[in-house]
Image: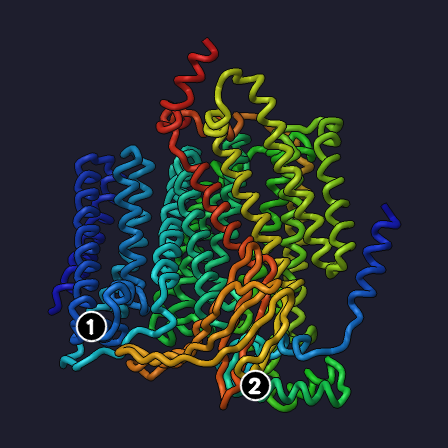
């Protein structure tokens, strides 16, 4: 079992290492034409010129973070489709974790309580007449 | 005053009258007043139906003196789309919402017993209907007159002139309006301190859930086939708002079974019914208010105050009712053992509700950020993909486990026996997908898919042999019908598994390319060869179209001459849209978008989605599961129980 998971991890490292492409960036920025779509979903002229800018940044050897930063300085923070994990945006990113944790605690508390009764199999109650069920 | 508007006013007055009769009928225990309340409801429904028919008539007869008709129709518009233009705008779609709610109320009155629970349900449902009628009579009047008669209308947005968009809004509203009835049943049950609402609500929950599923499905198909960006879901606020009630209603569909079996989770079920309805109001509101920017929204309107008021009122009302009946709500414990179906339902609820609250948070976060940071951030797909993906994987794993666990308590030996084969399927799936050098995420997706699929298939086979012993000569179809709730659920699970693997296939293994091709130039793309043959031109009264001719070849065989097009419409603002062309080779699609041409060079976006059709098939399987679970007892009783008693005798 361990070797199986080790193989999966090794595989993920090998398959994850690839060159930066336009598709790695255009999912993270919004088209600035005002349509509200992420760049990869927009086909307008503005989107095309943004793609050309990104491609030239890739060719000049910039990495993902540098490109995103440059786009942000050019178009403002509204260009980001993915708010940064800092400041007020921390709440956005950690909220799901918080919700799941709270939910897990509630489920744990419910699972500990076992003083229960069995009233009937729901697979079968569907076959009982409503009148019968309600009385 | 215009006839349709008068009709809405009469419906509003009748609706208010029914509220009066039902309120005092319940208070004074007066059957006569309740009867009068019912009559008032029928009058309101009749006038809502009349105003809806009248609006369709205005569209068909090009009555451009009605502002709504002039805004969404034109003389050139085909007759079918003149009818569907009814729900193309905010005001008409609110009328459709009200019409569908009135159909639900009518069906409830005809189907259900007329007792105190039903009286409460009618009181609350009619309060909801009064709210919508009030909007139609004040800020959202679809019968507003222009004061003059324009020679032609602005026309219908070309993107809405598709069969998918003819189906999407009505199906979604069937889901939305149904949730109002589910909410009414839950609140009525708690007001009466009565568990009966659970049994009565079951069919309405499943029915509503089926339509929400269909509404989302048609919206996704429309985005994929018509919007021409190559996807079907963009985590847009309006799209999200249709998913939210589906998630919470799916949770309710499961947790309600625990209330039936254990008399537990009473508070939770009421909260789920209420949150589902709140999400429905939110969805209706987001689409119409323009408060959160969305490509699917109708634009700015003055509907914000009434909808905000409704949202707050429903929340406070639910909490007050819960507080007032806190003794009744005190639930019993619900599990005998952690290894039980009840426990898996708890985890299922955790995942579904956590998903819905996360999507909700992402949807409203632009407003939160505006309040805190001073500007509206855009929450795009990366956020949702990052936070929802782990929850989706967990849900699929849980789908496998929940089938393996029985109600009450699992025998550990039996459990190991049931999970042996699925575990093997997991490893086979992982090994095979690694052999094909797939991405790690897709390996994991295929592995958990294989695990859950095997638990389901195995359970079908085991149940068949077990029931064969129990029911002897009873045929398999009769056994399935007898246990239709279980097998409807299993079928829906299979649909969900197909959707999961279809989405995973697209996200992790899609091929996409922007290409420029000269006339007669060939291009290899995956297993296919594309040959561009030139452009065709077609001019009609409605639009001008440019069709690119692209031959699609595979293994030396011509599969299809694809004709992606650019269309320019003559009415309205002269919108230009792209008509994609799709070649389906199950389960994949070759998808071509024609982006433009200069000289003898044409530009295309070409895409192969390897499993997209599994999503569509999965949606139908999901719906079929719901329909199967919904088969009424009286249909089954003649066919199954009569035979069963004869067999046992």
Specify whether A33 is left or right of A21.
left
Residue A118 at x, y = what percent?
A: 57, 26
Residue at the location (78% across, 73% down)?
A18
- Tag 1 residue: B144
Mark closer to the observer (1, 2): 2
Q: Please check whether the numbered discs 1 and 2 fall on a single chain.
A: no
Residue B409 at x, y = what percent?
A: 66, 28
* Cα gap from disc 1 to disc 2, whole angstroms: 42 Å
Question: Would residue B371 be visible to someone looking at this image?
Answer: no
Q: Quadrant of the N terminus of chain B?
A: bottom left
- Residue occupying the far top of the picture: B649
Q: Which chain is mark 1 on? A: B
> In the rendered image, which quarter is residue B122 located in?
top left
Q: Secondary structure at mark 1?
A: loop
Residue B247 at x, y = what percent?
A: 52, 52
Specify the color scheme.
rainbow
**Viewer-proximal residue among B306 and B500:** B500
- Tag 2 residue: A48
Question: Would residue B485 be visible to someone looking at this image?
Answer: yes
**Viewer-proximal residue among B269 and B158:** B158
Q: Quick one: label 1, few (<14), some, or many (20+) residues within 10 Å?
A: some
Residue B336 at x, y = what percent?
A: 65, 30
Indicate which disc residue B233 carries: none
**Viewer-proximal residue among B250 and B567:** B567
Q: Which chain is mark 2 on? A: A
Residue at the location (20% across, 64% down)?
B55
């Amino acid at each position: 079992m361990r070797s199986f998971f080790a193989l999966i991890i090794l595989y993920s490292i090998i398959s994850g290492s690839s060159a930066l492409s336009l598709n790695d960036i255009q999912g993270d920025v919004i088209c600035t034409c005002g349509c509200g779509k992420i760049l990869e979903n927009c086909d307008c002229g503005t989107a095309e010129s943004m793609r050309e800018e990104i491609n030239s940044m890739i060719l000049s050897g910039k990495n993902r973070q540098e490109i995103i930063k440059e786009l942000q300085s050019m178009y403002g923070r509204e260009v980001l489709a993915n708010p940064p994990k800092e400041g007020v945006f921390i709440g956005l990113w950690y909220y799901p974790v918080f919700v799941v944790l709270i939910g897990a605690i509630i489920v744990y508390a419910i699972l500990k309580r076992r003083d229960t009764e069995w009233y009937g199999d729901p697979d079968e109650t569907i076959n009982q007449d409503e009148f019968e069920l309600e009385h | 005053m215009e006839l349709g508007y008068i009709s809405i006013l009469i419906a509003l007055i009748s609706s208010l009258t029914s509220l009066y009769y039902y309120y005092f009928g319940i208070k004074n225990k007066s059957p006569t007043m309740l009867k009068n309340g019912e009559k008032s409801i029928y009058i309101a429904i009749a006038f809502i139906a009349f105003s809806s028919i009248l609006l369709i008539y205005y569209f068909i007869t090009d009555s451009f003196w009605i502002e709504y008709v002039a805004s969404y129709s034109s003389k050139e518009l085909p007759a079918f789309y003149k009818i569907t233009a009814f729900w193309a705008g905010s005001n008409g779609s609110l009328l459709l919402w009200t019409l569908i709610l009135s159909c639900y109320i009518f069906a409830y009155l005809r189907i259900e017993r007329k007792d105190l629970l039903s009286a409460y349900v009618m009181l609350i449902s009619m309060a909801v209907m009064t709210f919508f009628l009030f909007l139609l009579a004040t800020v959202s009047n679809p019968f507003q007159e222009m004061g003059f008669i324009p020679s032609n209308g602005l026309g219908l947005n070309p993107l809405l002139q598709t069969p998918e968009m003819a189906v999407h809004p009505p199906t979604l509203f069937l889901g939305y309006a149904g949730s109002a009835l589910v909410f009414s049943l839950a609140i009525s049950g708690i007001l009466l301190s009565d568990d009966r609402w659970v049994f009565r609500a079951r069919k309405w929950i499943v029915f509503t859930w089926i339509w929400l599923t269909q509404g989302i499905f048609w919206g996704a198909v429309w985005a994929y086939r018509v919007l021409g960006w190559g996807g079907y879901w963009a985590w847009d606020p309006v799209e999200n708002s249709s998913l939210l009630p589906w998630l919470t209603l799916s949770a309710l569909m499961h947790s309600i079974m625990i209330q039936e079996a254990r008399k537990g989770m009473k508070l939770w079920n009421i909260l789920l019914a209420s949150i589902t309805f709140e999400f429905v109001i939110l969805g209706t509101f987001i689409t119409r208010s323009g408060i959160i920017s969305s490509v699917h929204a109708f634009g700015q309107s003055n509907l914000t105050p009434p909808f905000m008021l409704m949202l707050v009122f429903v929340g406070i009302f639910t909490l007050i009712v819960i507080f007032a009946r806190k003794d009744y709500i005190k639930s019993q414990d619900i599990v005998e053992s952690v290894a039980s179906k009840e426990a898996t339902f708890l985890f299922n609820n955790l995942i579904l509700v956590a998903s819905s609250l996360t999507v909700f948070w992402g949807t409203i976060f632009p407003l939160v950020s505006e309040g805190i940071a001073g500007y509206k951030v855009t929450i795009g797909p990366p956020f949702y993909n990052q936070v929802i993906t782990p929850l989706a994987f967990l849900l699929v794993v849980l789908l496998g486990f929940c089938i393996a666990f029985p109600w009450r308590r699992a025998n550990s030996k039996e459990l190991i026996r049931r999970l042996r084969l699925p575990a093997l399927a997991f490893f086979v799936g992982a090994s095979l997908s690694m052999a094909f050098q797939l991405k790690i995420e897709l390996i994991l997706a295929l592995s958990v898919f294989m695990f859950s699929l095997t638990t389901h298939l195995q359970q079908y086979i085991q149940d068949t042999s077990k029931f064969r012993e129990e029911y002897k000569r009873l045929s398999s179809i009769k056994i399935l019908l007898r246990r239709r709730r279980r097998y409807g659920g299993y079928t829906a699970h299979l649909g969900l598994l197909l959707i999961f693997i279809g989405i995973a296939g697209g996200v992790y293994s899609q091929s996409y390319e922007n290409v420029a091709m000269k006339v007669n130039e060939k291009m290899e793309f995956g297993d296919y060869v594309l040959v561009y043959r030139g452009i065709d031109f077609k001019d009609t009264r409605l639009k001008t179209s440019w069709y690119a001719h692209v031959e699609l070849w595979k293994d030396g065989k011509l599969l299809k001459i694809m004709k992606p097009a650019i269309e320019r419409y003559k009415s309205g603002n002269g919108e230009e849209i792209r008509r994609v062309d799709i070649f389906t080779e199950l389960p994949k699609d070759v998808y071509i978008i024609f982006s433009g041409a200069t000289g003898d060079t044409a530009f295309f976006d070409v895409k192969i989605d390897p499993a997209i059709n599994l999503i569509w098939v999965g949606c139908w399987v999901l719906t079929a599961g719901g329909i199967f679970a919904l088969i009424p007892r009286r249909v089954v009783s003649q066919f199954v129980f009569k035979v069963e008693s004869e067999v046992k005798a």
